[in-house]
Amino acid sequence: FAAHGSPELGKMVIRRSDGTTLYQTKELALAKVKLRDHNVDRSLHVVGSEQSLYFRQVFKILELWGFEAAAKCRHISYELVQLAGGKMSSREGTVVPYHGFVAEAEAKALALAREHGISAAPEAVAHRVALAAIKYAFLRVDTNKTIIFAWDQALSFDGNAGPYLQYAYARSNKLLADFAQDVPRLESLDYSPEPAEAHLCRTLADFPDCAAQALSEHAPNLVANYLYDLARAFTDFYQVCPVLKAAGEVCFFRQSLVAAFNSVLSSGALLMGMELPQEM
């Protein structure tokens, strides 16, 4: 690397003196096949940050070999996960197996579902809440920061958590179901929106730019935190702006806002792989 102007990359052994290969030998061979034979749009390597130097070396070798498509390769690094009580350690018995982790999440979510009076298929709802709690807790954190996982935060129905988004979505579904007719199309409206309505409108309008930025920067946390801001804006709107009891075109306008929120939240959750229960 030093001979090609990148001394900071140190050295990488591709083949041992006895002719045997290493992990990076196979990595480079696979990369050649992908870039040469499959015309990939992008090649993303989602691997922990401790491998950052390794991937910089691999990508540089591909570049030196003349693969222009090496520019399509990117290492999406992430930091580690810690429990609220401290680091995981196999020696101390604090490593959490995935299946046990999900089972505990489902048990806690089921208890919360019953506590909140969720009667619609509580076991099915608990499963979706558990997975949303886990996914959102991981995805809302910048990949350059360590994730501190805590059950009470991840399973919150009124904080920056997956269940909070699910609850807001279910509430919007209930409102839409209570209307006697479909959402009307308003060509014009002689009405000055309340501050909470205007804020919700502005937040809804931010979604396309947020999604585009998240894609460009490979940063799902941007979508996660946008959805939390959107759910808060909807909750504020719901608390101060009566929907079903509003009169005439104001009622239709607010119904349209609820429908727009429902649609955008659903689209954002889809990007994050989160299921939203129809009712809770």
Image (spheres, rainbow, N blue to C red):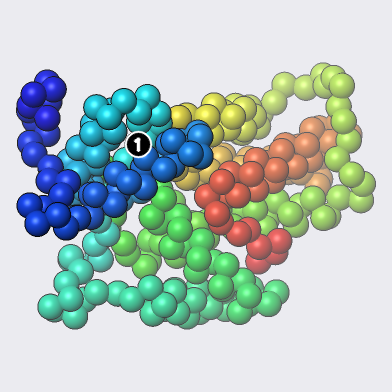
Examine the rendering and report whether any part of residue 157 can be seen. no
Three-letter residue code for mark 1: Arg
Q: Which residue is mark 1?
A: 74
The reply, left or right, for residue 35 in relation to residue 204 is left
Total label count?
1
Residue 274, how many percent across, how many down? 56, 56
Q: Nearer the viewer, residue 254 or 43?
A: 43
Which residue is pictured at 13% across the width and 22% down the height? 4
Name the quadrant containing residue 44.
Answer: top left
Residue 154, how many percent across, how many down? 41, 62
Q: Residue furthest right?
A: 181
Q: Quadrant of the N terminus?
A: top left
Above-or-below relation of 159 to 234: below
Residue 207, how many percent across, how many down? 58, 32
The reply, left or right, for residue 212 in relation to residue 31 is right
Which residue is pictured at 41% across the width and 43% down the height? 33
Q: Quadrant of the C terminus?
A: bottom right
Mark 1: few/some/many CA within 10 Å (<14, 14-19, 20+): some
Name the quadrant containing residue 267.
Answer: top right
